[in-house]
Image (cartoon, helix red, strand yellow):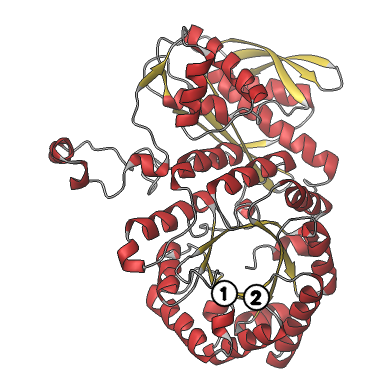
């Protein structure tokens, strides 16, 4: 927290660490880097890039982000042990502004059932961890895990010890989403009043959403003096998720007179960033999602529509443009040029380099030949799928389906592998999608359990593009994929192939092995 601006609330984004723990939300290193760059453009103050001790792949992802992303502080999570802390430091040390975030459980239930440690041992371990981290890095954050269920006197004692040991930021997490706004306000008020040197450190809040109060609890902590909020894009995360970045930021901005604080977030980039994360993780944004859902600025009631025509503020407390939403309908057609297309992409909140623009423009022209009208949703879909469908190692070369009423459908799929192999496979199924999925499995040599197949329209009209969302289980983990085309069967096959590619890449690097991440991976759920 800047001493020159005590009313500035820092936004600590943990989408790449806590958010990725949401079942099926694991990302490839390339996807993590893309999200990290989007977060930097969004204006977040801190990016928690991962848990370096969890696996070699996690370490490499954190290190790549630390080396290539400039602007925000780049943070690595570590338990209070020497191995974790050293791995976190080696991963983030190349960042322009590195941070090590150490944590240790403090609640009675964790002390007894998880750690088997007495209070004195907890304090000693926390102090040793903070001191070791501080000997390596100047910016240290400490979290007493399950703080909201920790005895207040003991929590104060632990926080005091961490501050004395050199912690610059003290994060007070509601690890299991148990607390209430009034309780958390009292907790932060007590710590601010009773911890010596409290004015010299930044108090942070990290809330989970198990009871649906993560945003409310975070805002309550801010009213009590917290000046860092830990949150994720779209609120993704362990169990019911985390405090939603877009919701807490817009609450602060919309009700600035109530909270008396502000953030450095470029709110016009919220919507494209949320859509990017949704596309990469395969986690759809609910239509009624606050701030960035499709219905957030929609009005169907006649009374509401009448009021809106008179003055937008009658039923809108935020403007769509404030979060990066556009209300433009028909935007471009097949005769539109590259310059007009680039400008529309920028208006939608996306920044593409020349090579990326050329790739998307080619897809745009091909789509324009198939569709009568193109809407903003069509362009967003093209941009968001820029990278996720081209990573391989398997690529879709051909697809044929044959279905008739009362008969099994038959699909013929041709796949090309990055090593040059080309495989053609035929399969029968209950319908064209089922048959095509079976053909892909046989061609790629990967068998998965399909849990969910969803399709939704991304724009309007009979020729609208359809976004297919596929959820499968493999190796004890959930994996999701998505794809957008005007052909529903093709969308489904491309989404399914995206999942197969994630699994294939994971098997190569060891990321998919059921026990590969061991105790360290399980510990990610802690904070």
Q: Nearer the viewer, residue 472 or 494?
A: 494
Residue 421: image location, x then y, percent: 85, 17
Residue drawn at the location 71% of the way across and 48% of the way down: 476
Q: Earlier in the sequence, mark 1 or mark 2?
A: 2
Within 10 Å of disc 1 (Cα), the crowding (few <14, some 14-19, many 20+) is many
Residue 525: name its quadrant.
bottom right
Under circle 1, the secondary element is: strand
Residue drawn at the location 73% of the way across and 56% of the way down: 96
- Please say if the residues under marks 1 and 2 sit with CB atoms less than 8 Å apart: yes
Which residue is denoted by mark 2 in the rendering? Answer: 168
Residue 281: image location, x then y, percent: 60, 41
Q: Is residue 205 above or below residue 233?
A: below
Q: In the current view of this chain or complex, which residue is farthest to the front?
A: 4
In which quadrant of the rendered image does the C terminus lie?
A: bottom right
Task: Tell me how far mark 1 sits from mark 2, CA to CA.
Answer: 7 Å
For residue 335, the mark is none
Residue 380: image location, x then y, percent: 50, 28
């Amino acid at each position: 927290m800047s001493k020159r601006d005590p009313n500035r609330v820092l936004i600590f984004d943990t989408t790449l660490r806590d958010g990725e723990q949401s079942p099926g939300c694991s990302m490839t290193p390339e996807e993590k880097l893309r999200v990290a760059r989007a977060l930097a453009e969004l204006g977040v103050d801190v990016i928690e890039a991962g848990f370096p001790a969890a696996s070699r792949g996690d370490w490499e992802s954190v290190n790549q982000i630390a080396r290539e992303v400039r602007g925000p502080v780049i943070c690595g999570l570590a338990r209070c042990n020497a191995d974790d802390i050293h791995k976190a430091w080696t991963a983030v040390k190349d960042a322009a502004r590195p941070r090590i975030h150490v944590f240790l459980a403090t609640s009675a239930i964790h002390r007894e059932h998880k750690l088997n440690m007495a209070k004195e041992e907890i304090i000693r371990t926390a102090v040793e961890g903070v001191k070791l981290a501080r000997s390596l890095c100047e910016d240290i954050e400490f979290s007493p895990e399950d703080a909201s269920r920790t005895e207040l006197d003991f929590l104060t004692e632990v926080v005091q010890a961490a501050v004395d040991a050199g912690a610059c930021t003290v994060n007070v997490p509601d690890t299991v989403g148990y607390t209430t706004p009034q309780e958390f306000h009292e907790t932060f008020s007590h710590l601010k009043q009773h911890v010596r040197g409290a004015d010299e450190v930044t108090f942070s809040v990290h809330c989970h959403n198990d009871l649906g109060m993560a945003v409310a609890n975070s805002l309550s902590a801010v009213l009590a003096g917290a000046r860092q909020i830990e949150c994720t894009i779209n609120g993704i995360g362990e169990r019911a998720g985390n405090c939603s970045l877009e919701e807490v930021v817009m609450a602060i901005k919309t009700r600035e007179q109530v909270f008396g604080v502000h953030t450095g977030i470029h709110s016009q980039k919220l919507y494209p960033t949320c859509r990017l994360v949704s596309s990469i993780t395969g986690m759809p944004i609910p239509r009624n999602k606050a701030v960035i859902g499709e219905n957030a600025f929609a009005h169907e009631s006649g009374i509401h529509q009448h009021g809106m025509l008179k003055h937008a503020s009658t039923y809108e407390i935020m403007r769509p443009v404030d979060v990066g939403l556009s209300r433009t309908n028909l935007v471009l057609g097949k005769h539109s040029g590259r310059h007009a297309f680039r400008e529309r992409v920028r208006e939608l909140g996306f920044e593409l380099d020349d090579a990326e623009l050329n790739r998307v423009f080619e897809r745009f022209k091909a789509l324009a030949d198939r569709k009568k009208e193109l809407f903003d949703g069509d362009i967003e879909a093209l941009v968001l799928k820029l990278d996720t469908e081209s990573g391989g190692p398997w690529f879709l070369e051909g697809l044929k389906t044959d279905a008739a009423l009362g008969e099994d459908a038959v699909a013929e799929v041709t796949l090309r592998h990055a090593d040059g192999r080309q495989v053609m496979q035929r399969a029968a199924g209950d319908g064209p999608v089922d048959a095509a999925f079976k053909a892909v499995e046989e061609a790629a040599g990967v068998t998965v359990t399909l849990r969910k197949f969803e399709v939704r329209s991304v724009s309007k009209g009979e020729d609208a593009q359809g976004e297919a969302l596929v959820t499968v289980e493999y190796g004890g983990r959930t994996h999701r994929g998505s794809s957008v085309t005007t052909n529903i069967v093709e969308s489904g096959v491309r989404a399914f192939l995206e999942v197969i590619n994630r699994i294939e890449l994971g098997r190569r690097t060891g990321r998919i092995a059921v026990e590969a991440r061991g105790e360290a991976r399980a510990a990610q759920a802690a904070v």
